[in-house]
Image (tube, rainbow, N blue to C red):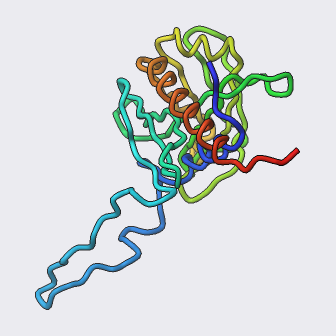
Amino acid sequence: MTKITAAGLALVVALASTTSLCAQTTEAVPADSPEISPGGLVLGTEVASGDKIGDTYTVATFEAWEQRCIRTESGIDPCQLYLLVKDADGNATAEFSIFGLPVTEANPAAAGATFIAPLETLLTTGLMLQIDDKPAKGYPFTFCTQIGCIARLGFTTEELDALKSGSEAKAVIVPFVAPTEKVELAISLKGLTAGLEAVDAANDAADAAAAAAAPTTAQ
């Protein structure tokens, strides 16, 4: 199964920082302030359609997972599989995205992923992820933006197979205000296999389109 190339990966990773359903932002209203009538009634502003280059949009859903793509000039867009992660009370807490990668001698990762945790996460403890009853692994947070703190994960072929055949993964983060406590987040793996197949197919098409559009070097 062909995976996304390095060029496509750059676009896919950009998806992690474009929109965030559970993120804290510094803007509560659109940049273009809506018109207000003398009576104090807001007349509203036009909502972006998501049709601009660089916008993200949802193509399909697979159980709780979404196939999200980023719009490009070619119209053949790279994608990743996205999940809004909720806590035990049903509150949106984090975001998890995954996409296939080409395995090479230099790159043993068969898939890459991003995990976006709330800004109030204790970064020094990192992220712990466990697939079903397999040994847990720790991952550092790479950087933080206004949408949250981001950990970038790589999965080997064996780990990717475990994700596809598994039923649930568990992510653990530690709150900054309560460093002795742990927040356990359940990540359903239902729909992940079908979702990744759709993402891989979309990225194969995007890679082929990019290769066809690339200028050839004269011999």
- Residue sitting at 51 percent across and 33 percent down? 202
Q: Is residue 112 left or right of residue 92?
A: right
Which sits in the foreground, 102 or 176? 102
Residue 194 in sight here: yes
State the residue lying farthest toward the bottom: 38
Q: Position of residue 209 (x, y in %)?
A: 59, 41
Residue occupying image coordinates x 64% and y 27% = 3
Q: Quadrant of the C terminus?
A: top right
Q: Is residue 128 visible?
A: no
At a point 58% along the width and 38% down the height, the residue shown is: 115
Q: Is residue 43 left or right of residue 196?
A: left
Extreme residue in the left direction: 39
Q: Is residue 117 left or right of residue 83?
A: right
On the image, the x and y values in percent for residue 175 come to 57, 42
**How many marks overall?**
0
Q: Position of residue 160 (x, y in %)?
A: 62, 17
Answer left or right for 69 relative to 90. right
Which quarter of the figure has residue 191? top left
Is 171 or 5 nearer to us in this picture? 5
Which image quadrant: the N terminus?
top right
Tell me if residue 56 comes above or below residue 188 in the rendering.
Answer: below
Image coords of residue 137 (percent x, y) = 70, 22
The correct choice, above or below, for 73 with respect to 38 in the image is above
Residue at 41% x, 29% y is 65
